[in-house]
Image (spheres, rainbow, N blue to C red):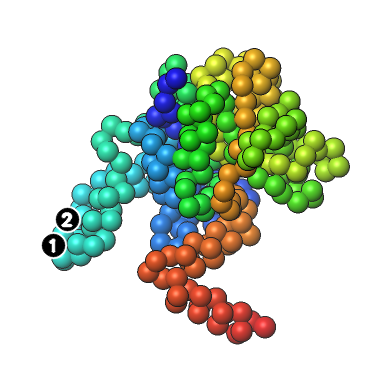
């Protein structure tokens, strides 16, 4: 069985739900405590053994590419000023040369289309997809938990989590048929079902391990929910021919594509930050008191 070594991060989205913050800054570059959101997702991928990341970008997203490049003048300046600690951190976070690729999604045709745009770089091997809107706080990275399952089962795996019934129309939802511990088998999945007609309250959380046959399906995928080419629809078709599992992973996810989700991420990551944690708690307590 081939190992999962490559991951796709679709970063072409416009971030309309967090405007005006994202008018000029890519939403993936918004800071969560002391790092841009995208770094958390790249770290999650690396912690799962991913060796090559394909960023599917679009216009106005150049800051992402720059962020994962060496900043020669800045580093030189930090060196001269003896700011070794931050310099070390910058260098530690720099991907190994040649371990990232950037492809353009030329038109915003949907997540399925974004994933398809990476097909030539992924080639004929299994791969992961991590949606950078979703940050996941977990002891073992969510994707690493999925890889652990994948190494036993093969096939295709998606991460799922329970959500309140009134939120099902915002996500992809699975239709489970059986459960073995944290792993579900499914008969279907549906993108953004109407409230009241969803087959379950298990949402697709934005982490996927997929077989390359999905690219052939995406190539001919008709538009679905929201008039977009949906990854969920292609997966639902592939499920007829291939093994598909859903893992209820251990951890908490934050949907940073909306303002409250982003705020929750900041609160959680600030409180568990090794340098700032205790003081952050005090900041939040004071803010609560002062705003009663
Ligand atoms: C995408 C997927 C959806 C998934 C969600 C997770 O939707 O299409 O299946 O549940 O991400 O955040 P989007 O947020 O792009 O509308």
x then y, percent, for residue 152 = 51, 28
The residue singled out by tag 2 in the image is 76
Query: Can residue 62 be seen from the camera position used here?
Result: no
x then y, percent, for residue 226 = 72, 34
Is 85 above or below relative to 215? below
Give the residue drawn at x 21%, y 49%. Answer: 72
x then y, percent, for residue 208 = 55, 33
- Left or right placement of residue 175 versus residue 121 in this view: right
| Labels 2 & 1 near each other (Cβ < 8 A) | yes
Q: Quadrant of residue 236?
A: top right
Q: Secondary structure at mark 2?
A: helix
Is 244 above or below relative to 82? above
Give the residue drawn at x 25%, y 36%. Answer: 97
Residue at the limit of the structure toward the front, as seen here: 181
Give the residue drawn at x 85%, y 37%. Answer: 197
Name the disc covering residue 80, or none: 1
Q: Residues within 10 Å of mark 2 (few under 14, many from 20)?
A: few
């Amino acid at each position: 069985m081939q190992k999962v070594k490559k991951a796709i991060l679709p970063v072409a989205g416009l971030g309309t739900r967090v405007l005006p913050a994202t008018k000029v800054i890519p939403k993936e570059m918004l800071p969560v405590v002391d790092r841009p959101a995208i770094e958390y997702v790249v770290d999650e991928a690396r912690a799962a053994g991913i060796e090559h990341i394909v960023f599917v970008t679009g216009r106005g997203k150049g800051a992402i590419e720059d962020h994962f490049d060496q900043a020669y003048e800045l580093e030189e300046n930090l060196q001269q000023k003896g700011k070794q600690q931050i310099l070390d951190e910058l260098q530690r976070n720099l991907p190994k040369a040649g371990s990232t690729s950037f492809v353009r999604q030329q038109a915003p045709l949907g997540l399925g289309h974004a994933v398809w745009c990476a097909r030539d770089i992924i080639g004929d091997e299994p791969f992961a997809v991590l949606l950078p809107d979703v940050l996941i706080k977990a002891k073992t990275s969510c994707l690493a938990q999925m890889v652990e399952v994948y190494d036993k089962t093969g096939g295709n795996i998606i991460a799922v989590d329970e959500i309140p019934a009134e939120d099902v129309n915002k996500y992809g939802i699975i239709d489970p048929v059986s459960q073995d511990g944290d792993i579900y088998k499914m008969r279907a999945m549906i993108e953004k079902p109407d409230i009241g007609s969803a087959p379950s309250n298990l949402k697709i959380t934005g982490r996927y391990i997929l077989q390359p046959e999905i690219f052939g399906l995406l190539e001919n995928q008709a538009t679905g929910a929201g008039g977009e080419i949906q990854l969920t629809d292609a997966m639902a078709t592939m499920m007829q021919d291939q093994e598909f599992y859903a893992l209820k992973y251990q951890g908490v996810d934050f949907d940073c594509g909306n303002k409250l989700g982003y705020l929750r991420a900041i609160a959680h990551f600030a409180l568990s930050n090794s340098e700032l944690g205790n003081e952050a708690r005090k900041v939040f307590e004071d803010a609560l008191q002062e705003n009663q």
